[in-house]
Amino acid sequence: MFYICSMNDLHVIWFRRDLRVHDHAALVAACASGGQVLPLYIFDTRHWHRPDTSGRQFDFLLESLADLDGALRKRGSKLCLRSGNAAEVLSQIHTQYGIASLHFHAASHDPEETERVQHVRSWAMKAGIPLREQAVRRAMPLTPGESETAFRHYMRQPRLNAPENLDTPDMVSEDWPVASDYGLDDDACAGRQTGGRTNGVLQLRQYLAGRGRPASKRNLSVTDRESSASGLSPYLNWGTLSDREVWQAAMRAKGALLSDGDETFAASLDAFVENLEQRSRLLTAKPRHEQVENAGLPNDIFKREMVGAADPLLAAWASGRTGFPLLDASMRCLQATGRLESGLRSLLLSFATCHLWLDPTAPAQHLARLSTDFDGALFYGNARKVVGISSHP
């Protein structure tokens, strides 16, 4: 099937997991075109029907989109919402208005998102629409030394300013959806973080102002570790904050702390920056063949039986009633807040697979649904390393 070439000067900026106007290479490139810019977000119906997605994740996304829409409106623009297959949505917009170019950030190595972007690339090639795909991070080199050098070189680059004004066409947007539109159940989570860049910036400032100071101390209780955590993972995962602005803020704070002689807090920030690098490495590392074939977890080498929600062992574990205080408290914390440090999340999954001898699929999906910061590439990348799942000693 062939499409007509674009007759209008409409440049689409396709937002995905980059929900901000600051330090946004694709948005800057779209504005540099000189034509009208259409900020577009497409709800991926298939994603929200997955068994590892939940209402709390969707609500966080809606709050993040509302915050982005507010930032766009301050610049004379607004967010256009559509739902469905990305290539089909873009085709409809092109047929009605004509698209001169399509701007977006490159996908991570999450198989689902890679497939989605590939369909868009194929459609754009047939339609004769130029793609302007911006690489947020380059693939990490193989050796740790080269990896650290590449990471820090990127992070030191100047951040991109948000555009002051945007010329956006008056285009009909779909209504704001609710979780039930995608079959997602009500998901009360009293302690859940609020989505959006505004709240992400507030979390970052509070962390650097002193909340993160105890993080490097030894033998902290679970409560103390939780209270001193940055809480930035969902904001980074949805791109309401850029990795680069967070890294630069942390490095500035570290320099000021060392000048004041506060080596304790500086050490906490060293660990925080190291976690940022590990996150970037996981997102940019090319997956092995078996990871591409199985977007979630590897095949269970122990061939444990898969169980449903009614299984008594799975039900006791999922509701925090195993009788092991640390595990049960961790599960209840995740249920109530949508967040839990990665070490405890791994411990929960390892207990389900090693001690309860459950196939890892159902426990992993349960933890994913409870996690506000769920990102397939990161979540399953970490889960594959958990004892009881990893095929390596």
Image (cartoon, rainbow, N blue to C red):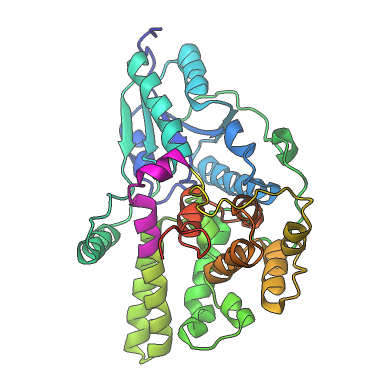
Within the magenta stretch, is there residue 279? yes
Judge by depth and name the residue closer to the eye, 144 or 274: 144
- Residue 138 at x, y = what percent? 27, 49
Residue 261 vertical position relative to residue 126 in the rendered view, above or below = below
Q: In which quarter of the image is the N terminus?
A: top left
The answer, for residue 163, to whether it is visible in the render is no
In-image side of 32 versus 364 (left or right): left
What is the magenta range?
Answer: 277-294
The residue at the point 46 percent across, 46 percent down is: 18
Residue drawn where x is 52% and y is 70% of the image: 230
In the visual, does 152 lie left or right of 299?
A: left
Is residue 344 visible in the rendered image? The answer is yes
* The image quarter in which residue 6 lies: top left
The foreground one among 228 and 163 is: 228
Q: For residue 148, what is the image quadrant?
A: bottom left
Is residue 226 a member of the stretch shown in magenta?
Answer: no
